[in-house]
Image (cartoon, rainbow, N blue to C red):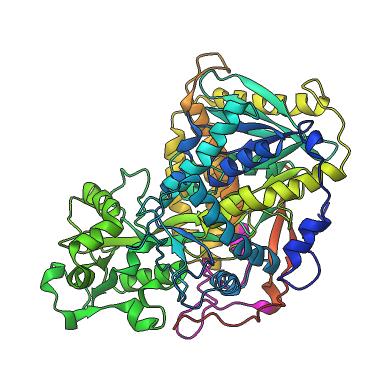
Amino acid sequence: MTLTLNAKTPPGPIEQKWDTHKFEMKLVNPANKRKFRVIVVGTGLAGGSAAATLSELGYQVSCFCFHDSPRRAHSIAAQGGINAAKNYQNDGDSIYRLFYDTIKGGDFRSREANVYRLAEVSVNIIDQCVAQGVPFAREYGGLLANRSFGGAQVSRTFYARGQTGQQLLLGAYQALERQIVRGGVQMYPMTEMLDLIVVDGRARGIIARDLLTGAITPHVADAVVLATGGYGNVFFLSTNAKLSNCTAIWRAYRRGAAFGNPCFTQIHPTCIPVSGDYQSKLTLMSESLRNDGRVWVPRRRGDKRAPSEIPEAERDYYLERKYPSFGNLAPRDIASRAAKEVCDEGRGVGPTGLGVYLDFADAIGRLGEDTIRDRYGNLFDIYQRITDENPYRVPMRIYPAIHYTMGGLWVDYNLMTTIPGLHAIGEANFSDHGANRLGASALMQGLADGYFILPYTIGDYLATNKLDRVDASHPAVREADAAVRGRISKLLGVRGGRTADSFHRELGKTMWELCGMSRNADGLKKALEVIPQIRDQFWKEVVVPNTGDTVAFNQELEKAGRVADFLELAELICIDALHRNESCGGHFREEYQTADGEAKRDDEHFAYAAAWEYGGEGKPPVLNKEPLTFEAVHLSQRSYK
């Protein structure tokens, strides 16, 4: 049955929507909050901040992560910074400008009201984090420093050298640990969610597996929050941590949560290039490097000279040439496609020809090596350790790679999915970034959702719904538990000869080649033939060590379960990409581009969020559409020239 999508966007001027909505939402009496239990899955910036805040408000919180400690969440890998419309530089920034830049950066494929709210609460995030002791960079006089990121002409990005995610996560982590010690949060480390419990159409818990013992246990609650990150590892090679996966949101999708815009995947332009088939992941080089680094390639095809031997007149600073207004800080999707274009022309650098230079010689000459070391020292160290090249002496070599996913579970203005009681926050939802996320906005969204939005909206849900008591004996709980055990038994029973990793690598190669930086109808149709074949082979040939005990420590079983879900999600991504006959942001269909090679939208037919509904085993997904209306901004062809 087709879903009815209700975004629940409040009426009124966009500047007043959130304040009005906060006042009109129902509240839970402080003395009653302890009667409710909320499950939070994930402990990154979104999950960690949400769990800590909900507990501090008085709710009972059960928090799950599949690491040995909440502080190992992938948010720790974020490097460059976090956006906020503080206008400390007095350079013309404002809440509206951050809102507009985000809408435009996402190529007008996001919900206006959500994006304005994100810009509005961004100013509170910095105050919160400073109060927690996050060591943001400061100017000589002690004021907080800012730098620029792609898609903006102001400096609004706050940073802690090249380890901003780590420092922000430590702030959220200490807030979470305080609540654990207080007894408000019950923490379940090394525990993975494998299914969602839905009772009478409402999310009432999860089925989780202890990764150390293999024990499978139901956990029930009054509401469930998924903060499990994105699904970029469907491409195998990405900048995501190896354990990052789609299982939590995919299980929710199969239980009835709509999946929004799955084909909106982000390619990051500054990553260390692939060096061989042996690699299992890629390494990000922060976008912040493009503040001082200049991107270039030789003007002549096949030029194999060392960069120091190529004179200035024979270099093509192609981003500065093509996008003079933004230069090297063009948005990620545009900078990535530009890199691919020059490499396809035969002007790429490095052993594979799939690379471009990111050169700091001018900045070092102008500012001095010590200044550059202060700004980016740890990033330069990472690069040198991986490549054995000194970026203070020779240019970095970079190339685009999968980094982030704008798609995710569809949520309304309250961050609730199409399953009542199930909320999705941070990268796990689709809500704020449209078809392309601007740099330094992921950390902003994660903390906005966790600290400042969900604590209001989840209270409204709990206050306005009568929830009957549910325990492990409920038939819906037993059914979900049995489904998990059945999938595990099926994986253990295959007894093939190929590892889950080998299937994952094959899937990733297919996705990158046919649904990666650029796509076309023929390639997507081919992918939709190949992916089911890989999936069929997987269920016939995968090998999972089987000790005869379905409840035991088994890391290959973990991998196999995650790859099985990737093999299903990959098909949905390609279906979505094939149906969207336009180019927008990170979704670049080769058939739909302007005369100068830029993305060409079709606002008449595709100005909507695609919310895909699970159709059932062996049946195609069902497309639902949330029309995107724009009142505060006007639809226009995106230009960064």
Drawn side of residue 311 relative to residue 280, left or right: left
Return the residue found at the far bottom: 595
Position of 588 compared to 298: left or right?
Answer: right
Q: Is residue 537 visible?
A: no
Residue 37 appears at what percent x and percent y?
Answer: 74, 32
Q: Nearer the viewer, residue 211 or 459?
A: 459
Q: Measuring 31% from the left and 46% from the top, which residue is drawn there?
A: 277
The region drawn magenta spans 575-603
Q: Quadrant of residue 406?
A: bottom right
Magenta stretch containing residue 88, yes or no? no
Q: Is residue 450 above or below residue 106?
A: above
Q: Residue at x 80, y 46 (%)?
A: 461
Residue situated in front as seen by the camera: 71 or 218: 71
Seen from the viewer's position, the closer of residues 210 and 46 is: 46
| Quarter of the C terminus within the rendering | bottom left
Q: Is residue 579 magenta?
A: yes
- Work out whether 312 lies above or below 272: below
